[in-house]
Amino acid sequence: MTLVFEGLLRELAPQALGAVVRRYGHFDTAEDAVQEALIAAATQWPRDGVPDNPRGWLIAVAARRLTDLLRAEQARQRRENTWTLPPVAPDDLGDADDTLILLFMCCHPALPPEQQIALTLRSVAGLTTQEIARAFLVPEPTMGQRISRAKQRVKASGVPFRMPADRAERLAAVLHVLYLIFTEGYASTAGPQVYRSELSTEAIRLTRIVHRLLPRDGEVAGLLALMLLTDARRAARVGVDGALILLESQDRSLWRQDLIAEGVDLVTTAMSTGPSGPYQLQAAIAALHDEAPTAADTDWPQIEALYGALLSLAPNPMTALNHAVAVAMARGPAPALELVSALAEDKRLADHHRLHAVRAHLLEMSGEVDGALTAYRLAAQLTRSLPEQRYLNTKAATLARDQVRE
Amino acid sequence: MKYMILHHASQADYVAMAGENSAVGRAWTPEELAAMGEFMGKWTNELVESGEFVDAIGLAAPVHTRRLSADGVITDGPYAETAEVVGGITIIDCASFDRATEIAAKLADAPSPDYVRARGYADIRPIMNSLDELTA
């Protein structure tokens, strides 16, 4: 299938699914019907040409398939398929918002995060089960079960196809899922690759859709900006040997200036129009990194201040750790080491490789080589990411070698 | 006076019209379906021209049905494959029950496969103007 068709189908998939579920219900079966319609389109359109109304074509074919699937299901069961009446509220939103409603369904609070993510990728992003399984490094049947369990849970929850009443709260869940998809693609938690870029690309695409539907929401804009500003550095983040390259050593000429400009523009507009949320603050930090011509030019005092604001808004041990790094860069390692020691008391962080990696860097900065060596080695033992492990071991080895030379 | 003409069809009829063999008979050919569509269009247009047409609607396949019972329980698609239910209605405003019957009788000429024609029927029902007619 050519990229043109793939892009078109990806765009239309959630709209078609939304339209079919809105009209006929049956979220789980409708999802299968739309998948079959997409497969039909993928074979017929390149051969016969794209129909005049591709969205209508998909909806019509999916509705036909839904009828068939329901008939088969009802013939098999013939038992009472009963449920309780969902509360009905006026819903004057047009078809354009079906994609958003679908996102709310997929990120339903009844689902654990891994099911929210899998269902979002399948139903909204239109990825196949195989693609999602590959991205998350699990066997296809495992992912298939995860998706079908998620669909059954959504169906069992009896959630009506309309905008949820607690929209602001639910939007936060949607943004969190998109953020998780992005970070899973950017810094994979397991396995040999530093990032699985297709997940990041997919997260950006979905966040763009949400931003288009909710252009005035500052946190949606902030999240999109954060993704763009982080993704802009993608090419510079990994060396030819697959090893991780830290921000300070990256070749900044490889950074995507178009993404940086778009991200900076988004976050600047968002921050000037309302109170700043956590995604906006993180995007602002990423923007300061991206706009520095060299690592030495980085505006660390400003970054320290932004991390401080982020900490007071959304306390989180990982944010606190990054705050400590900014303190070190702005004011030297001594005050930062104090902060890190306090953080080591936090059970969530005590065994996290990043805490020990940061501590190692700070000790190295203050010339405490023995302590730095121990911390680097401990961090290397604790990480599950192979490129990170390689990086940390290299740091330890370099330090040990320099120590012998002296 | 207003009357409602009810056109009946089963899930199996919908399937056959969509081009598949079904529990009641063989699939319709695209030509048969087109001929039926043309006939129905002409039949309806004549009513529009005579000023007797009020409204017409077609219903989605019976499998897409939710039945709400008095205790609030909702059942999905309660109809068996061959159970005949209303598939569409035409509302007319004409001089008499006999005139309404005359209009509906023209449906007997609708082109369709023999097995459909053999058991086809339509109901004609007077529409009430108000609840008062119940006790009149």
Image (cartoon, rainbow, N blue to C red):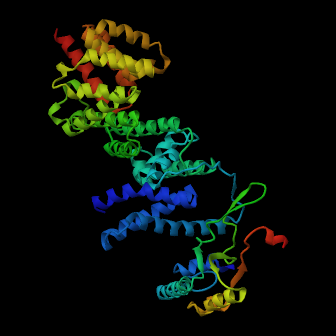
Q: Position of residue A220 (x, y in %)?
A: 39, 37
Left or right of residue B94: residue A192 = left
Q: Position of residue A317 (x, y in %)?
A: 43, 20
Q: Which of the 4 image quarters holds residue A305?
A: top left
Can residue A356 be spotted in the picture? no
Is A272 above or below relative to B22?
above
Q: Residue furthest right?
A: B135
User: At x 55% / y 60%, what residue is drawn?
Assistant: A23
Is A155 above or below relative to A406?
below
- Report the quarter where the N terminus of chain B lies: bottom right
Q: Position of residue B114 (x, y in %)?
A: 60, 93
Can residue B7 be spotted in the picture? yes
For the residue pair A54 and A265, the one nearer the viewer reads as A265
Q: Which of the 4 image quarters holds residue A72?
A: bottom right
Left or right of residue A393: residue B53 = right
For the residue pair A373 and B125, the one nearer the viewer reads as B125
For the residue pair A44 and A309, the one nearer the viewer reads as A309
Q: Position of residue A159 (x, y in %)?
A: 60, 48
- Report the quarter where the C terminus of chain B lies: bottom right
User: At x 73% / y 79%, what residue is drawn?
Assistant: B126
Q: Which of the 4 image quarters holds residue A267?
A: top left
Left or right of residue A354: residue B9 = right
Is A120 above or below relative to B126?
above
